[in-house]
Amino acid sequence: MEPLPKGANFQRCKLLWEIGLHIAGDPATPYDGNRDMCIAVGKGSGDDFRPWLRMATGAPHLAHAVAEGTLDLAIVNPSALLTQAVRGTGLFKTPLPLAMVANYPSWDRFAFMVNPRSGLRSLAEIRDRRFPLRLSTREDRNHSGRMLIEQIFAIYGFTLADLESWGGSLQLNTGPGDERRMKAMREGSIDAIFDEGLVRWFDAALEVGFQPIAPEPEVFDALLALGWRKVVIPAGRYPHLTVDYPCIDFSGWPLYTRNSVPEEDIYKVCAAIAAREQQIMWENENPWALFEGIRQIGTETESTPMDVPLHPGAERWFREHGYRR
């Protein structure tokens, strides 16, 4: 493990980090509250702070700030939204000059689950029957899962607002395992759950009778054109899943930058990740997302989709350290 730096300046930097982490990480803060951080590394020895490297967490739309130079690095979940930014599809009207630095391993899938008592056998029937669906989803309109729902509904020719206009309703949640969702699921007061974070709710939904439904092949094709991936959860991966389930890949938390950021700067970022590997919180609640070592963040794995090229600085660092050919 790389030792922590010493000295008064490091102590002051770490004090600010701990303050920010405590405030931004407060679980009581709502999704649209002050729960993100922007970290600027630079020079503060003069009258003004002169940033050298500005990094932030936040919504997928921060890709514009990175492309325009307001930020230098950002992280997004899932990988498919960075793919959309680079392709200029989905959320993004034009391609953005972005590249991946590293991909934090996070195995996840997006599932469409319905209560058989609804009589629904496909997503198309929601539109065709103008079904007043009681849908369990996220309360944050800017959540990546809500964005995927709107994208797939658009392919079918309707919106969440249309759903509500014909009598549907949204059961809103902060996270995938929100107790409000779990209670509604057990009581049968919802017709469907469309969400990611499967480890928190998917098998429990199967256990009480909910069934997975998949988009039609032509809808999958349209989603793939946007930048999503089609994957299959094999039968038995979850105790109550008895059939293979084709669905949408929701994996990866890519750290990305502008193509124009100097190669040496991004090389230093990769070196910093490697130096702090033992101190980074790697995802460990999902048995399919276990961290396999620093090699994993720069290469294609089930938890790290790599549909966007690495920045040259990252490519060089991973190659020189034996993680890429």
Image (cartoon, rainbow, N blue to C red):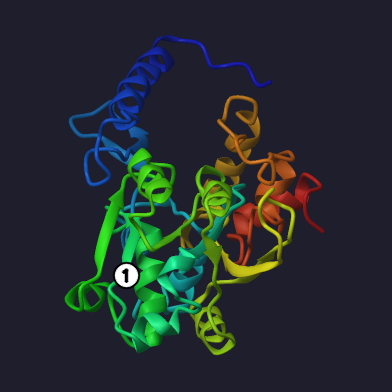
Q: Is residue 13 visible?
A: yes
x, y percentage for residue 89?
42, 79
Name the residue carrying label 1: 133
Residue found 24% across the figure and 64% down from its top:
169
**Percent x, y for residue 258?**
45, 61
Q: Which corner quadrant of the image does residue 23 belong to? A: top left
| Residue that sits furthest to the front in the current view | 117
Residue 141 appears in the figure: no
Q: Position of residue 121 (x, y in %)?
A: 50, 78
Residue under the image location 20 percent in, 34 percent down: 48
When the figure is inspected, residue 275 is found, relative to residue 121, above or below; the finding is: above
Numbered label tally: 1
Q: Is residue 85 above or below residue 31?
A: below
In the shown orientation, is residue 316 left or right of residue 182?
Answer: right
* Left or right: 277 as drawn, with respect to 93: right
Q: Nearer the viewer, residue 97 or 305?
A: 305
Quadrant the C terminus occupies: bottom right
* Picture quarter with the N terminus: top right
Q: Dot 1, how many residues are within 10 Å of its Cα: few (below 14), some (14-19), or many (20+)?
A: many
Answer left or right for 102 relative to 316: left
What element does badge 1 sit on? loop
- Nearest the eye: 177 or 186: 186
In x, y percent, where is residue 128? 36, 89
In the image shown, does 296 or 117 lie closer to the viewer?
A: 117
Residue 233 placement: quadrant: bottom right
Q: What's under tag 1, amino acid-wise?
A: Leu
Residue at image location 62% in from the left, 60% down from the top: 312
Identify the residue shown where x is 78% and y is 49%: 323
